[in-house]
Amino acid sequence: MGKIHYQADDIYFYKHPEERKIVEPFLRCFNVTKAFKKTRGNDRVSCYYLKAEPFIAELIGLEKELLCIYAPFDRFQARTIKLHDEVIASDRTRLDPLGSVVVSDDPKTYSVVSDYLVSNPERPPIVALSLDELGRLNSVDDIRRLFVNQLFRRDLFSLESPLKTDTTFFGRSEIVAELLDRFRSGQNSGLFGLRRIGKSSVLYALMRRVGDGEIAGSIYLDVSSPGVYKLRWWELLQHIIVELARPLDLKRGERSKVRALSLKYQEKTAAKHFKVDILNLFGRFRGNRILLLLDEIEHITFDISPSEHWAEDFLPLWQSIRSVHQDTQGRFGFVVVGVNPHILEADRVGQYDNPLFSTTKPFYLGPLDRRSLRDMVRRIGRFMGLKCEESLYNKLYDEYGGHPFLVRQACSFLAKKVTSRPGVLTAELFETNRNHIALLLERNIRQILNVLAIWYPDEFEMVRMLAQGDQDTFVEFARGSATFTQHVEGYGLVKDARENPQLTIGLVQKYLSKVPRNPARIDEDTKDPEAVLAEISRRRNAIEIAFRCLLRDGLRFSEGKKAMHVVLNCLGEKRRAELAQFSYSQVWNEMYFSELIAVISKNWGAFQKRLPENKDKVITWMEHINKCRADAHARELNEEDLAFLKVCFRRIEELLDLDS
């Protein structure tokens, strides 16, 4: 039997004896170590710290004290939980994050809290009950059932949306600190990684650090929304200001000073208005600083946006943003986030310098390390009443390589198999279900690999070859291209790419080991545009690699030592200067598909025996394949283009003796 600590008894319950009835039912399993009131305006709650007896602490996995609050109102409201959260935030070292208890006079307390938790799925569990229900806790078994039924009912492993709280955010503290330090020092950053690796969750964590430290105000925009990427550049600048001002509750006089709230930006004056508005809003934000976070940046990037106007709008948008960044000495900064770092890697936008090239540093978000994976699985499992065998962590890491989404989905499947809580996730349970989980996750693996298949087909082909045992070709390619190495290692797919390359995700290894060099066809019935683009990229890539070898060997045979000179003469002056630094063998890995077409067109005689078809037909097929490449046409292809593309693929594959 527990007791009330003498200080809580003498100081608090002496003044509020009517509240003893709130804590007395819990004394069967807990000691009350502290009691006080928390108020804010007209809202108030009574707070009690409950220290579990060993048997109940072991049962529900408590390591610290449990917060219990009492709201003495006939109607429980969600804003009371904000007071509850303030108490927890003020004493994290003492209170257990596993969960808490809420008691109220309202007979609907449980349903109100339950609805709140459904809309906030990342939150730790809250055990909720009315005063009448509290009075019916007559035994240790009643309390045990209460905690087991309410604490462990949610599947926190299955969360698919970006993580917006620290409760389920793991293993990314270093990259968050790096991005924060760069913003503090007036520098801008980019963050890139595979799909579902946690990029958006890092942005939310960065926003929390910026806000908690009162460093700056921040704004997050997901530019994958058609309502954003279909805007023209001046409209997007205005949208940024409107979203910045939205939470500020500006008064009429203050609103009139913000031009984006009183007039429409025009193309000729948008840059000037944007700068004036940013300067006017600075004083309303912590630290007189503003951090702009743009997620899914591909959607407003030249060459790869689904809206063609970003080929024209990219430069004025970023020239305007960069200008404000420079004029404010970095007090206005930004982080761009996405899958494809093209926005920072390309030095030119058409004929002009890319304003972000060499001015914004790219970072890659890789998988979790073993320790962070263990921490994630262990803590989320504890919230669900599940312990994990130590041997399970290594099996999860080997199979999923620390990819947090894949690990959580696998654990969600396993958790559903453990019907009694508290329970244990075992290595044996995982082995029994490993193959079934692999089938369930195959769609996610395809989505993850489509990053390479669509944007970097060379990388995809090399990783496929590595998965199928061709380590030598992979190493040769990695040693010849720093960008390739940066991509495959940065994405966390391969480690030690130039010496002893190994795929880091066992499930990816198994999947790619079965992928043929040249997928046979584009599925006629597919409804997934991304799958079509991935298929196009894979087939185009196989053709491109074959052409590189054909041209390299054909020119070497026909031209001898003059071969390099012949290749460079097919290119423009700027590209000749860029590629002259490479050896003859290396230069082929650096050339674009369009440049391969130029080489074969100007030197057709060197390949005529190998390519018996009419020159004009071959060039037409190659040009159409190049026109329909995924990196330039992320938008959906029309039926006519797609139909002719299939013909071009088939005819070129026949010429090159590629498997079809």
Image (tube, rainbow, N blue to C red):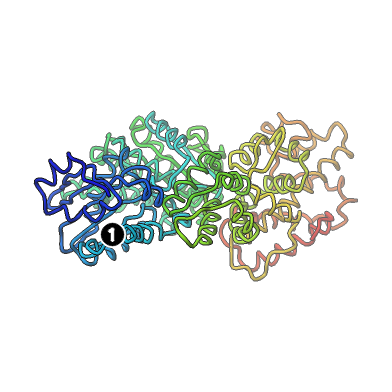
Query: 229 left or right of 254?
Result: right
Which x, y percent locates residue 366?
55, 41
Q: Residue at x 27, y 61 (%)?
A: 137
Residue lying furthest front: 1
Which of these two is toward me, 176 or 17?
17
Q: Is residue 608 above or below residue 568?
A: below
Name the residue located 72 percent from the left edge and 45 percent from the top edge. 462
Q: For this view, does 623 lie left or right of residue 200?
A: right
Left or right: residue 281 versus residue 365 is left
Depicted 224 relative to depicted 497: above or below:
below
Q: Secondary structure at mark 1?
A: strand
Residue 524: x and y in percent read 67, 70
State the quadrant of the C terminus.
bottom right
Give the percent coordinates (x, y) of residue 19. Answer: 15, 53
Q: Residues within 10 Å of mark 1 (few under 14, many from 20)?
A: many
Confirm whether residue 319 shows in the render.
Answer: yes
Residue 622 x, y percent position in the rendering: 74, 54
Residue 35 lies in quadrant: top left
Query: In the shown orientation, is residue 321 left or right of residue 374?
Result: left
Q: Which residue is mark 1?
A: 128
Task: Specify the amino acid type for callout 1.
Answer: Ala
Q: Residue furthest bottom?
A: 525
Closest to the observer: 269 or 284? Answer: 284
* Residue 229 in view of the camera: no
Tag count in the figure?
1
Along the viewing direction, whichever of 426 and 357 lies nearer the viewer: 426
Residue at (22% x, 49% y) in the render? 83
